[in-house]
Image: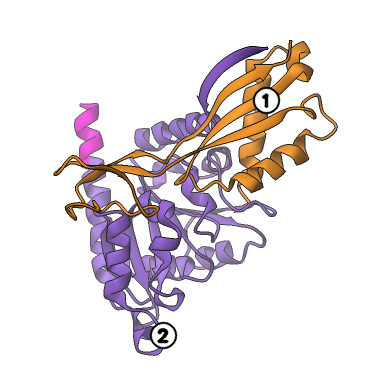
Chain colours: A orange, B purple
Amino acid sequence: MHELSIAKNIVEIIKESVEENDLRSIERVVLKVGELSGVVPDSLQFSLEAISTGTELESAKYEMKRIPFTIKCKVCGNVSDNELGIVKCPVCGSKDTEVVSGNELLISEIILKN
Amino acid sequence: MSVITVERKILAKNDELAEHNRNLLKQNEIFTINLVSSPGSGKTSLLEKTFETLGSKVDISVIEGDVQTSLDAERVANYNVPVVSIVTNGACHLEAKLVQDALSNLDLEKTELLFIENVGNLVCPAGFDLGENMKIVLVSTTEGDDKPLKYPKMFRNSEAMIINKTDLIPYVNCNIETLKNNALNVNPGLKIFEVSCTSGAGIKEWCNWLVENVRTKHSHEKQLMY
């Protein structure tokens, strides 16, 4: 359940990014969560709600953008979504590939109400 | 409605502390391994065999991470190896701050090789940099051969995989070639060792590799310094 510790980090970044008197006016926080990040969005959502209850962030909503696991083959150039974690190119079979996306764990945007 | 664009890594704070640890370890010429695995795969047993085999050849220290109890730290202390215990009281992984605190309780000048035995868990420790030189994942034959496919991030983020309990292969449902192929499909550069902490098979090869890395690390750091 490392999502709880990740949730605490998210709250800290929000507090650093938004002026204190604006915290109650946060409508939505957009997070980017890669499929290979090892983070379960539902658990993270639960943890965020649990630690926000009774705080100025109680009414904030969290939107999780799932980023797919994608690899690019250095041999044939094919870019594809692949079975999670498998780096073997589905077209030519080479393992000489790079992970293009899927590792992300970012706080992307904070949207304030007017 | 106004939008604040942040685009910050959520674990940036942990990564900064990890970098601080890495610099401290580098200054002291310490080769550091973050040992990760599921519970019961044999991390502490591997350490015990490593102490027995290396003897006084290498100055080893250990940071022992456990959810509860200092039982593993006591096992390490039996070998007269300096050990600092971190009891996480429920947390499923170690973070860089905990390691930073533990490092202040170790004699770094008398350490060449540092093992950080992480909490037994194949998910959470994968995401947290502690400032180590490398993660090494330990997997035992009793867990089956599908673990790299089920926990790809851990195998992706490790530089080596140690397969333990090879003496049990005749009795368990684990095809070692399948296990290796699964791991290499997730991380083609993975260095693989096969060991048994019960029979001692493969321990010498593992220890030789360790000594080589400690020596390479030292000569590399010295080159950088001068």
Chain part drawn in magenta: B219-226
Q: Is residue B76 left or right of residue A111?
A: left
**Numbered mark located on residue A28 in the image:** 1
Whether residue A65 is visible: yes
Residue beneath the point at 40% across and 69% down: B146
Locate the C terminus of chain B by quadrant. top left
Residue at point 75%, 13% (across, down): A22
Residue A76 lies, in percent from the top left, at 15, 43
Where residue B99 sits: x, y (%)?
53, 43
**Side (left or right) of B215 relative to A86:** left
Q: Chain of mark 1?
A: A
Quarter of the image where one finds residue B136: bottom left
Residue position marked by numbered label 2 in the rendering: B172
Q: Is residue B23 magenta?
A: no
Amino acid type, callout 2: Val
Residue A46 located left or right of residue B17: right
Whether residue B202 is visible here, answered yes or no, is no
User: Could you tell me how many numbered marks the image carries?
Assistant: 2
What kind of secondary structure does the magenta stretch mostly adopt?
helix
Q: Nearer the viewer, mark 2 or mark 1?
A: 1
**Which residue sits furthest bottom?**
B171
Bin the neighbour count of mark 1 within 10 Å (Cα to Cα): few under 14, some 14-19, many 20 and up. some
